[in-house]
Amino acid sequence: MKTHCVNSPTRLTDDALLARVHDLARCERRTTVELIAHLAEMDRRRLHLAEGCSSLFTYCTEVLHFSEHAAYNRIECARVARRFPLVLEKLAEGSVHLTAVRLLSPHLTPDNHAELLDHARHLGKRGVELLVASLRPLPDVPSLVRRLPLQPAPMDADQSMLAEMEVTGASLTGMEVRGTTTEGRRPGGPVVGEPIRVAPAPAATVKPLAPERY
């Protein structure tokens, strides 16, 4: 039997719709925090082994069917929350998100975790990355000069035709290299080979090394 588990919002007024969205966001945060707390205890007991999974990550992706990114974020938050329960409070109130906790996790200590979580309040991912960069500034990336690949010289019409015939395995029988067919007809115009494409270099990524340095 087909059931509808989602109430249609189309009949709600604007004010009711906005209020409902806020309520659902709070419910989602509360549910996520509860899940993280349970994953932390499950990780402590290593119950994933009894379920036939070699790791909690495998359990989250293959049994709970989370994406790799979602599983990784939740597991990292669960392990941080075991050390610093304040993380669960911050997640529940919505002042920090899962990605922020994951990025901060290597830098949290008993002395600084409350302060860092306050500094990360309502910051996006980029803002948290800058906060992390201010904690442990990295040296500038050394300048690098790379030699660009040489552009092959363009082939003339005859060379282009030969290359194309060799690649496709076409027979040269009855055809002259200079473009004369077996019936004495010449092609209507010169054959121009396709330009040789050089694979572009991979796009560079920009990450903060320290405040105002990337």
Image (cartoon, grey):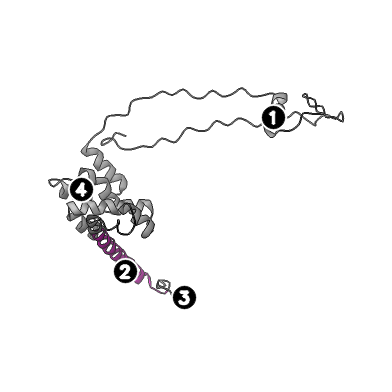
| Amino acid on which disc 2 is placed | Ala
Does the stretch in magenta take in 158?
A: no
Q: Residue at x 77, y 30 (%)?
A: 189
Q: From the viewer's perspective, is 122 left or right of 196?
A: left
Label 2 sits on residue: 19
Q: Residue at x 19, y 54 (%)?
A: 82
| Amino acid on which disc 4 is placed | His
Label 3 sits on residue: 2
Q: From the viewer's perspective, is 110 left or right of 176?
A: left
Is 154 placed above or below 47 here? above
Is 149 placed above or below 204 here? above
Q: Earlier in the sequence, mark 4 or mark 3?
A: 3
Q: Is residue 122 visible?
A: no
| Amino acid on which disc 3 is placed | Lys
- CA separation in Å, label 1 and label 4: 65 Å
Quadrant assignment, res 37: bottom left
Q: Residue at x 27, y 48 (%)?
A: 102
Q: Residue at x 16, y 48 (%)?
A: 115
Rendered image: mark on residue 119: 4
Q: Write the start and end of the magenta stretch as one range.
A: 11-38
